[in-house]
Image (cartoon, helix red, strand yellow):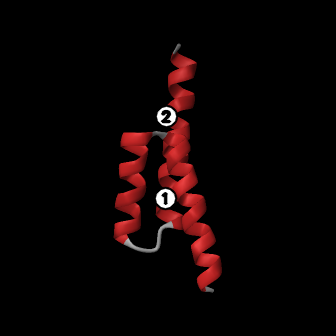
Amino acid sequence: MEQQHQDYVQKQQNLIAAIAEICVSPMQEIQALRILIYRGEAACRQYLRSVLVKHRKDS
């Protein structure tokens, strides 16, 4: 049980670091955190992928 909790916390920390790295505006960061809180990790990762795709298209 303790190991599962530590794994969960590590995943969340990694995801929050990815949010900070990928999102270029505070609004994107807020949106990503909102998605993480209300819809979960998978939805948040999907949002981050869409942000990355948008960055690539804009470049």
What percent of the width, then of the height, locates residue 6? 53, 27
- Please give the name of the residue rendered at 53% of the width and 13% of the height, measured from the top-left corner: 1
Q: Residues within 10 Å of mark 2 (few under 14, many from 20)?
A: few
* Label 1 with label 2: CB-CB less than 8 Å: no
Q: Name which quarter of the figure residue 51 lies in.
A: bottom right
Q: Is residue 13 above or below residue 59?
A: above
- Please give the name of the residue rendered at 40% of the width and 73% of the height, measured from the top-left corner: 25
| Dot 1 amino acid type | Ile
What percent of the width, then of the height, locates residue 56? 65, 78
- Please give the name of the residue rendered at 52% of the width and 31% of the height, measured from the top-left corner: 8
Residue 1 appears left or right of 36: right
Secondary structure at badge 1 equals: helix
- Please give the name of the residue rendered at 39% of the width and 52% of the height, measured from the top-left corner: 33
| Disc number lying in front (1 or 2) | 1
User: Label for residue 19?
Assistant: 1
Determine the CA span between mark 1 and mark 2.
15 Å
Given residues 4 and 45, the one toward you in this image is 45
Given residues 34 and 3, the one toward you in this image is 34
In which quadrant will I find the C terminus?
Answer: bottom right
Residue farthest along the bottom direction in this orientation:
59
Mark 2 highlights which residue? 9
